[in-house]
Image (cartoon, rainbow, N blue to C red):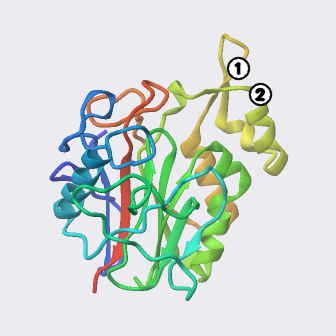
Amino acid sequence: MKFPKRNGVILPDWPAPAPVRAASTLRAGGVSRGSYASLNLSAGVGDDEANVARNRRIFAEMLDLPTEPMWLRQVHGIRVLDLDRADAPSATPHSGQPSPGSSSLSQPPAADGSVTSRPGRPCVVLTADCLPVLLCDTLGTRVGAVHAGWRGLAGGVLESAVRCMGVDPVQLLAWIGPGIGQGAYEVGGEVLERFAAIDRDAARCFAANSKGRWQADLDGLARRRLQAAGVRAVHGAGWCTHTDSERFFSHRRKAPCGRMATVIWLES
């Protein structure tokens, strides 16, 4: 699939207002080695912390980020942080040589998304098969980033993010970034049952395979959850992290592996 690129990133093709800036990284361009090669941006997958710190600096320079993103410890749940709240955690810039247990690399808040209305404060999620989903309002005053695997989708993480955005859902735009494609995403019957319990037509996003299991369309499931939450303008999707090993990390293809970042912020 063709997509706009700049310096090794995907630039979302969506009608976001002028103040909104967003990008999704590819796997190349960093310093990590082995299964993490090369622009691994996750500190939670076993990569060397010094390499992750360097990769994050490359990432920030590549996109000219206004400040340190709010990195999260993603747990496949439905918690979404409103970074504008007085009690919201703050991003702490990491040093060039972080020490284990003391840096922002090792102590991020547990959540699977964040939103903000503050210019210059990036929201970011990490993925390597799960979907990154970006949100913004049509006025360009609020943005959010969400990590959406099947557990999060079934649990309601996108609905949680839409509520946290705090605007009429019909005034929201969504962009679905790179995730695992249906042809590569085999799941058990319990996954289909979870979705069918909340959406009787969700079975349309599952195809039976020869093993008696199912191929799940994660993109399609995300679109259904967004539409159920009232979001009508949904863009993106169509990549497969599993089959495109040159551009993307994929946990199902090879674990452990690195993670790509998908980031969004409001320009000051």
Relative to residue 131, is residue 157 depicted above or below? below
Examine the image and state in which quarter residue 71 appears.
bottom left
Left or right, 96 with respect to 127, comes to: left
Residue at label 2? 189
C-alpha distance separating marks 1 and 2: 6 Å
Q: Quadrant of the N terminus?
A: top left
CB of mark 1 within 8 Å of CB of mark 2? yes
The amino acid pointed to by label 1 is Arg
Left or right, 7 with respect to 25, comes to: left
Foreground residue among 99 and 25: 99
Relative to residue 108, is residue 255 depicted above or below? above
Residue 109 spot, x, y in % from top left: 54, 64
Residue 79 spot, x, y in % from top left: 64, 64
Q: Quadrant of the C terminus?
A: bottom left
Q: Does residue 244 appear anywhere in the picture? A: yes
**Does dot 1 land on a helix, a strand or a loop?**
loop
Relative to residue 246, is residue 71 depicted above or below? below
Residue placed at 34% from the left, 55% from the top? Answer: 99
Relative to residue 186, is residue 81 depicted above or below? below
Left or right, 193 with respect to 228, comes to: right
Foreground residue among 97 and 168: 97
Seen as rendered, the residue at the extreme right is: 197
Left or right, 77 with respect to 258, comes to: right
Foreground residue among 262 and 91: 91
Foreground residue among 72 and 132: 72
Residue placed at 73% from the left, 14% from the top? Answer: 212
Examine the image and state in which quarter residue 170 appears.
bottom right
Q: Which mark is residue 213?
A: 1
The amino acid pointed to by label 2 is Gly
